[in-house]
Image (tube, rainbow, N blue to C red):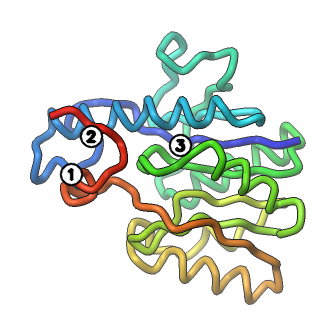
Amino acid sequence: MRALIIFIKNPEKGKVKTRLAATVGDERALEVYKELLVHTRRVAADVEVDCLLFYSNYVVPDDDWDAGRFKKFVQVGTDLGVRMQGAFELAFDRYGYEHVAIIGSDCAELTSDTITTAFNKLESSDVVLGPSTDGGYYLLGMSRLFPDVFENKHWSTSSVLEDTLVDIKNAGLTYSLLAKLTDIDTEADLVNSTLNFED
């Protein structure tokens, strides 16, 4: 049994893509984030797994995320690591999934095939990571809950991937890496994006 956790922010002006908004403005940043949500939704829906969608603040029952395809929840906890661990615990413990992966909604280069590859790698690895060019990761998958990867991390910094790999190696776990992709966090990322964002 496979589950894909998707973390999104409720799309509200001034509260999404703040680093991007610093140079392009809140309105443009919101438009870009909505496009990223469309891309993420399309990519996730095409993967043959159960999808668990976690909103940042509140569930929207009748939005573009089909409730028949995406089970909807709210992220719990002030720290990203706490929120992610809670989502993985729900998937493993409450629903009994055997392989669980999480993605955000910032990666325009992410494809359905990449996610499928991640789940296939979990058949022979304890952990799978999709490195991002900023030093973090766009995907984390596990074949069982490993809480250390969520603890003592400086989230949204260039050390996240490296620190996570140290935890994995110290625990003697096996891991696989996916192709390195770029999240859209800045105007430069936007200019170089593979998505056709309209001006």
Residue type (three-letter) at the residue carrying disc 3:
Phe
Label 3 or label 1, whichever lies nearer to me, is: 1
Q: CA distance from mark 3 to mark 1?
A: 19 Å
Image position of 97 with respect to 166: above or below: above
Residue located beneath label 3 in the image: 7
Number of numbered labels in the structure image: 3
Quadrant of the frame with the N terminus:
top right
Q: CA distance from mark 1 to mark 2?
A: 11 Å
N-term mark: 3 or 1? 3
Q: Which numbered marker is on residue 15? A: 2
Nearer the observer, 117 or 170: 117
For label 2, count other residues whose C-alpha is less than 10 Å away and answer few (under 14), some (14-19) or many (20+).
Answer: few
Residue type (three-letter) at the residue carrying disc 2:
Lys
Q: Residue furthest bottom?
A: 170
Residue located beneath label 1 in the image: 20
Q: Is residue 39 left or right of residue 140?
A: left
Q: Secondary structure at mark 2?
A: loop
